[in-house]
Image (cartoon, rainbow, N blue to C red):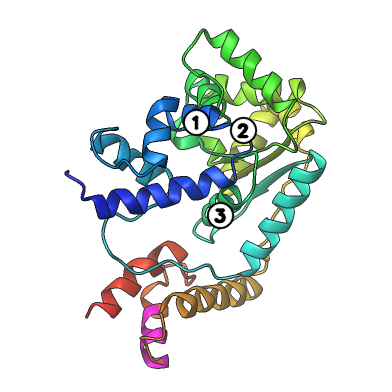
């Protein structure tokens, strides 16, 4: 796929926005991007061609959620889930606390976590489904903080620990943590131990993560009880447990997201139709479905 300079500029704008929230030097920020300092200096100064490949530009677009096509702008809706998670994430970061969030899928956990990471310094967001092995997991966190992630594993690990203990209020967000391989999951305990009282942690997943942890604790599998203890031996949840309260909250949440992103281009009838099409067989709306339905309605 060949990119135009208009698209490259759009991606660069987002890169520079992220740079403003990166606490380290330009060199370390370049490392976090996976390019060298000279390349970053050149694109930072507006050189959009023949500095990095289109594949790298596309990789940055994926990493930072930059649309390669003109589409509906995704506006933030301050839903109950978003507000509660932002407060929890801030508390974890400022006080080096650990929270284990297990709640329904499709309620905006990932969106909220990525948004917090985008807007706050020294926050690492990890999509664990993409870095399942121990090596990829630790090297991913290291690179995000500007630590050289290509050397010997023990050196990368030691440099990562040193960095986490010497930057201000680091926070590691582990999304889809249940997808980690067993050895990678155990490494959470090791890294937590090495950075206790220096680093905040926020682990999140759907209800399946809770089931997995409980099953392995009951089966006395090494590491699970210890990790659960480090996350205060409790699961955090935002969505109400009773059926009616849950449905009411999620319906209102979906309406808030639809309203924030319809750009004033849809009447109440259309908004209700969009909401209806987002409801699954369980009678609850999926926030992931809203974006597709909005595009279909606004382009029809």
Relative image position of residue 96 (x, y in whole percent): 79, 38
Q: Distance between the residues labelled 2 and 3?
A: 20 Å
Q: Distance between the residues labelled 3 and 1?
A: 18 Å
- Please name whichever residue, 94 or 238, is drawn nearer the observer in this view of the structure: 94
Label 1: few (<14), some or many (≥20) within 10 Å?
many
The prevailing secondary structure element of the residues shown in magenta is helix
Mark in the foreground, 2 or 1: 2
The residue that label 3 is drawn on is 115
Q: What range is drawn magenta here? A: 268-274
Q: How far apart are marks 2 and 1 (CA)?
A: 10 Å
Tell me which numbered mark, 2 or 1, is placed earlier along the sequence: 2
Q: Under tag 3, what secondary structure?
A: helix
Mark in the foreground, 2 or 3: 2
The residue that label 1 is drawn on is 32
Residue at the spot x=49%, y=70% of the render?
284
Label 3: few (<14), some or many (≥20) within 10 Å?
some
- Please name whichever residue, 232 or 17, is drawn nearer the observer in this view of the structure: 17
Label 2: few (<14), some or many (≥20) within 10 Å?
some
Relative image position of residue 115 (x, y in whole percent): 56, 54
Relative side of 48 to 219, left or right: left
Q: Under tag 1, what secondary structure?
A: helix
User: Pointer 2 and pointer 1: residues touching (CB < 8 Å)?
Assistant: yes
Tell me which numbered mark, 2 or 3, is placed earlier along the sequence: 2
Relative side of 202 to 2, left or right: right
Relative side of 231 to 133, left or right: right
Q: Can residue 220 be seen in this view?
A: no
């Amino acid at each position: 796929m060949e990119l135009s300079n208009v698209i490259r500029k759009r991606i660069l704008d987002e890169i520079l926005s992220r740079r403003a929230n990166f606490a380290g030097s330009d060199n370390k920020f370049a490392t976090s991007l996976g390019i060298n300092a000279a390349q970053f200096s050149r694109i930072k100064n507006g050189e959009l061609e023949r500095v990095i490949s289109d594949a790298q530009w596309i990789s940055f677009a994926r990493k930072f959620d930059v649309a390669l096509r003109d589409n509906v702008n995704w506006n933030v809706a301050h839903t109950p889930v978003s507000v509660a998670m932002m407060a929890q994430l801030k508390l974890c970061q400022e006080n080096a606390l650990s929270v284990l969030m297990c709640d329904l899928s499709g309620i905006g956990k990932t969106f909220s976590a990525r948004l917090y990471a985008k807007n706050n310094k020294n926050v690492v967001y990890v999509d664990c489904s993409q870095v399942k092995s121990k090596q990829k997991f630790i090297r991913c966190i290291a690179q995000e903080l500007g630590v050289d992630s290509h050397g010997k594993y023990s050196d990368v690990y030691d440099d990562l620990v040193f960095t986490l203990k010497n930057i201000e209020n680091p926070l590691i967000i582990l999304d889809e943590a249940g997808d980690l391989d067993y050895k990678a999951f155990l490494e959470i305990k090791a890294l937590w131990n090495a950075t206790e009282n220096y680093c905040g942690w926020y682990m999140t997943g759907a209800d399946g993560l809770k089931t997995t942890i409980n099953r392995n604790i009951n089966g006395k599998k090494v590491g699970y009880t210890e990790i659960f203890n480090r996350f205060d031996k409790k699961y955090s949840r935002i969505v109400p447990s009773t059926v009616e309260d849950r449905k009411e909250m999620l319906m209102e949440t979906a309406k808030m997201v639809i309203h924030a992103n319809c750009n004033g281009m849809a009447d109440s009838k259309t908004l209700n139709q969009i909401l209806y099409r987002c409801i699954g067989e369980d009678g609850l709306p999926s926030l992931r479905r809203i974006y597709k339905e909005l595009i279909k309605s606004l382009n029809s």
